[in-house]
Amino acid sequence: MNILSWVMVRLQILLSLLRSLRRAGAQPSASAAADSVVCSADGAPPMRTVQPVTVRPSGYQGSVLSFDQQGTTRYACLHPPQQAVAAAHANTQHQWPLLIYLHGSLTTPNSLYWFGRALFHLRHSYPLSSDPNVRGFMLLAPEGRRANPWSTDGPHTGVGFHWDEWYRNPTDNLDALAIDHFVDAAIATGQVDRSRIYVFGWSNGAYMAALYGVWRSDRIAAIAQYAGGDPWSRSPCPVPMQYRRQVPLVLLRNLCDALVPCATTSAWIATLTEQGWPFTHYNLDLSGNITTDSACDQHCSKIKGLYEHCRWPKKPALEQMLHCLKQSTL
């Protein structure tokens, strides 16, 4: 992707999110919107999809996986490190950790090339394995579905690609089942270290990463979130947090964020602390580097908050996140 295309895509997403922020004042109140949703022990009903429900991603420098799920073609991109590609040709017997990436609202797996390029390139070199002969990691990027989400807490991002974090049934959630399928497909290559499967998400994908990691605690070694919080507390249908294993978690958060406010991530940190959860968190400054500052920005404008939400953590912050993940295995 050339630099002009990258800039244009990024501007389009920023403008879409800005329009969502401006529309927020015209949205029904949270209580009014919640009245139209029938809540249950599973939270909200499955989210309302919109045609076309999925669109084939580009699969840049990787392969595109697909399967039919109840009449909808689900997609994912699988990006091996260079060492794994060479090993496949040489029939070398090594296995690599697998990092599942769940994109944010209104974006797709292609956001790895637009926003997450540092992480995309780290797959070739970062030593996520304990085996000194293994370099890099497999990167699996499933695609969510185009839908109108239920969320009423904060700006409503509207129709676009989302993960169904509002329907919290671990056995019937179609997005969780799609991720299961693609993880199985990655494992079937014979190149995945099953003791080191991690899930990382950004924004809406960060909420889904927490759900998926806890729901699949028998196969996910650790969870990472960027600009995400507590999915069980999300309106219009919060539900109690339930788990079989406290999966280690690392959170990267912004002190100014228009879509996942600092107060939201602070509440999530408090919840994890109260539960005695094995977790760590890092605060990011304006440029996306880890900072020692910990107080929420008291001068957080919508424009600044939108910018910080959409600019990704810098490479050193992502390396620190990967270092935290590496400490956990199954």
Image (cartoon, helix red, strand yellow):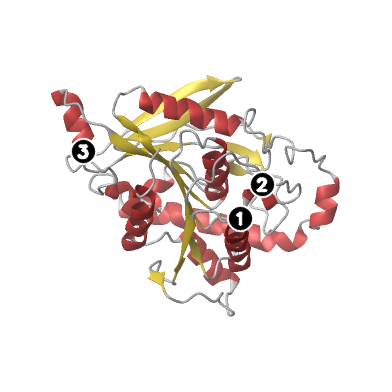
SS category of the residue bearing label 1: loop
Q: Position of residue 16 (x, y in %)?
A: 57, 55
Q: Residue at x 42, y 59 (%)?
A: 312
Q: Are marks 2 and 1 in contact (CB under 8 Å)?
A: yes
Q: Residue at x 54, y 39 (%)?
A: 212
Residue drawn at x 67%, y 63% is 22
Q: In the rendering, at what x and y percent does residue 150 appear?
A: 71, 45
The residue under the point 42% across, 75% down is: 292
- Tell me where residue 109 sits by quadrant: top left
Of residues 324 and 57, which is closer to you in this image?
A: 324
Query: Whole-Å distance between the Cαs marked 3 and 2?
Result: 39 Å
- Element carrying mark 3: helix
Q: Which residue is mark 3?
A: 82
Q: Which residue is mark 2?
A: 241
Q: Is residue 328 above or below residue 26?
A: above
Number of the front mark, 2 or 1: 1
SS of the residue under disc 2? loop
* Amino acid type shown at disc 2: Met
Label 2 crowding class (10 Å Cα cut-off): few <14, some 14-19, many 20+?
few
Task: Return the residue nearer the eye: 326 or 113.
Answer: 326
Mark 3 residue crowding within 10 angstroms, few (<14) / some (14–19) / many (20+): some
